[in-house]
């Protein structure tokens, strides 16, 4: 089972309105939010944990009060004392996205912005850098962000952060076909680009069966589920 949920910060979703939902997140997260400087970071942090809790409650018959987060040595979150629940979260710009599964998963989303594409030669494999720089027009930046998201999704799948060098593994992209070059150690891992928004790139890394669903949710949907069993 693999499901993707995403949420967009719509116009009218003020910080004051989102702060009302702090009661549904962990105390640790609420304290972190209070220390963030930028308004959008506060919004994304609150909405990110809400989205994880929503996905877990909805798919694993777990009540919200049972969800206690811990971090591995590299900072990747997991749910303590509950086995076979895997999730990963990413946010960028106006979007928060979460993947949930009964197997390992990594997910990433990036807002497409103007960027100096020469940095590809610093962080990517030569074959990836060559693909980007040989592309025409807007395809250059499309390839750049696609490869960036794919790499981030794999690193997050592994749960070891930047202890994995970005140029230590390489991708080949031909249409919708995505392959890891020299992928003998990755043969059971799948990669897909996600159709979230034309101004963003998003990718997921997973093993097991294909994606079951990709669903956009609203804050009201989340709160409705969490209210049923909230008692942190």
Image (spheres, rainbow, N blue to C red):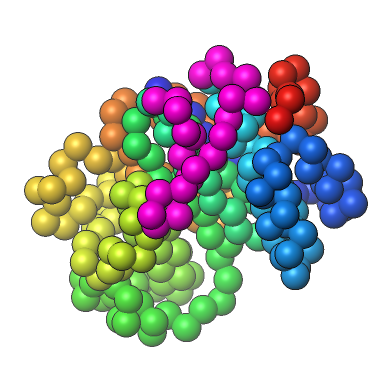
Q: Quadrant of the C terminus?
A: top right
Whether residue 54 is situated above or below residue 130 in the rendered picture: above
Camera-nearest residue between 15 and 70: 70
> Does 85 lie within the magenta span?
no
Whether residue 30 is situated above or below residue 132 in the rendered picture: above
> Is residue 133 at least partly visible in the picture?
no
Camera-nearest residue between 220 and 74: 74
> Does 80 lie within the magenta span?
yes
Residue 206 locus on image (x, y percent)? 33, 38
- Give the quarter of the image for residue 170: bottom left
Whether residue 59 is situated above or below residue 177 in the rendered picture: above
- The residue located at (16%, 57%) in the rendering is 181
Whether residue 175 is situated above or below residue 80 in the rendered picture: below
Camera-nearest residue between 81 and 51: 81
Q: Count the marks: how many?
A: 0
Horizontally, residue 183 falls left or right of residue 115, namely: left
> Is residue 45 at least partly visible in the picture?
yes
Residue 222 locus on image (x, y percent)? 72, 30
Q: Quadrant of the N terminus?
A: top left
Residue 223 locus on image (x, y percent)? 77, 29
- The residue located at (35%, 47%) in the rendering is 157
Horizontally, residue 115 falls left or right of residue 192, namely: right
- The residue located at (18%, 46%) in the rendering is 186
The magenta segment? 60-83
- The residue located at (47%, 83%) in the rendering is 116
Residue 149 locus on image (x, y percent)? 42, 58
């Amino acid at each position: 089972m693999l499901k993707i949920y995403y949420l967009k910060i719509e116009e009218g979703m003020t910080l004051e309105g989102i702060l009302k939902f702090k009661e549904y997140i962990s105390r640790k997260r609420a304290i972190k939010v209070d220390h963030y400087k930028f308004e959008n970071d506060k919004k994304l942090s609150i909405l990110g944990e809400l989205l994880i809790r929503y996905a877990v409650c909805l798919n694993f018959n777990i009540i919200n009060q049972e969800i206690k987060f811990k971090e591995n040595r590299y900072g990747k979150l997991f749910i303590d004392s509950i086995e076979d629940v895997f999730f990963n979260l990413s946010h960028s710009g106006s979007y928060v996205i979460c993947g949930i599964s009964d197997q390992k998963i990594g997910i990433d989303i990036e807002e497409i912005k103007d960027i100096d594409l020469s940095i590809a030669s610093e962080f990517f494999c030569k074959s990836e850098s060559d693909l980007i720089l040989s592309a025409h027009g807007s395809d250059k930046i499309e390839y750049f962000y696609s490869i960036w998201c794919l790499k981030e999704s794999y690193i997050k799948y592994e749960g070891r952060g930047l202890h994995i060098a970005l140029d230590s593994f390489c991708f080949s992209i031909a249409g919708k076909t995505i392959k890891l070059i020299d992928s003998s150690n990755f043969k059971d891992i799948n990669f897909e680009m996600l159709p979230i928004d034309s101004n963003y790139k998003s990718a997921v890394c997973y093993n097991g069966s294909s994606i079951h669903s990709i669903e956009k949710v609203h804050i009201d949907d989340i709160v409705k589920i969490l209210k049923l069993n909230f008692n942190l």
